[in-house]
């Protein structure tokens, strides 16, 4: 029972201090779950993020479910998810009950401006960590540059092929195509060894 409460408490802490969504929570996950508790490695967290991006729902909720499930099975997954969601839901309910039209208060506007800057810095830190972890060989940067190049191309330059390029530039298409390319390339390299 104590370990289940530990899972719940850990994810309440993660949920309480996460501002800005899934990627902004990586430094908190690293501190609470990797360094402090040793429940997962950074590589596992990145794998969970990858899976969470292609499954329905919020990245943070999916990550919580995966880590909780790894730690203590299905009940651990449920408790981790509940722990992650509970602080945000409580905060929103309290704000909705206590303050009408909270976004129009100058103090809140200024606080959110500061929070946006901090979230930007956390996301940049996360991007740097993900790039370092992903580029372990010469193939990964090639896939990255191809996907990035396709993603930033303006659709208007393709004239009559705009609808086709809209499909090609879709995040779903880019992620699935990259995953398929990685599967084929890395499997072939593994078989050649």
Image (spheres, helix red, strand yellow):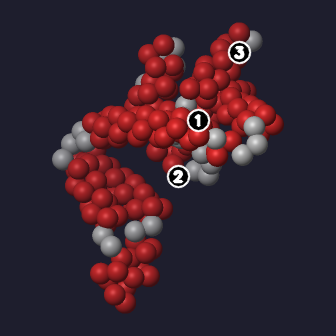
Q: Quadrant of the C terminus?
A: top left
Labels 2 and 1: the sequence-earlier one: 2
Give residue 142's quadrant in the image: bottom left
**Distance between the alpha carbons at the discs numbered 2 and 1:** 37 Å
**Distance between the alpha carbons at the discs numbered 3 and 2:** 29 Å
Answer whether residue 128 is visible to the viewer in this image: yes
Callout 2: SS: helix
Residue 154: x percent and y percent? 33, 73
| Structural crowding at the residue carrying mark 1, measured as other residues with C-alpha within 10 Å and reported as few (<14), some (14–19) or many (≥20) | few
Q: How many marks?
A: 3
Q: From this viewpoint, which residue is outermost toward the front?
A: 106
For residue 151, the mark is none
Give residue 35's quadrant in the image: top left
Q: From this viewpoint, which residue is outermost toward the top?
A: 2
Residue 182: x percent and y percent? 34, 53
Q: According to the image, label 2 marks what residue?
A: 54
Labels 3 and 2: the sequence-earlier one: 3
Q: Is residue 83 found left or right of 93 in the rendered image?
A: left
| Structural crowding at the residue carrying mark 3, measured as other residues with C-alpha within 10 Å and reported as few (<14), some (14–19) or many (≥20) | some
């Amino acid at each position: 029972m104590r370990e289940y409460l530990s899972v719940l408490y850990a994810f309440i802490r993660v949920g309480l201090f996460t501002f800005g969504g899934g990627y902004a929570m990586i430094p908190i996950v690293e501190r609470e779950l990797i360094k402090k508790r040793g429940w997962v490695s950074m590589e596992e967290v990145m794998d969970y993020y990858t899976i969470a991006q292609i499954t329905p729902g919020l990245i943070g909720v999916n990550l919580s479910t995966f880590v909780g499930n790894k730690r203590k099975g299905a009940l651990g997954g449920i408790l981790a998810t509940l722990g992650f969601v509970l602080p945000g839901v409580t905060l929103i309910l309290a704000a909705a009950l206590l303050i009408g039209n909270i976004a129009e208060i100058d103090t809140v506007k200024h606080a959110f401006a500061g929070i946006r800057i901090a979230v930007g810095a956390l996301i940049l830190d996360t991007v740097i960590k993900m790039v370092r972890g992903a580029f372990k060989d010469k193939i990964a940067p090639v896939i990255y540059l191809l996907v990035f190049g396709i993603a930033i191309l303006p659709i208007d330059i393709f004239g009559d092929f705009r609808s086709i390029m809209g499909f090609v530039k879709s995040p779903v298409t880019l992620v699935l195509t990259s995953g398929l390319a990685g599967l084929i390339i890395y499997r072939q390299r593994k078989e050649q060894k």
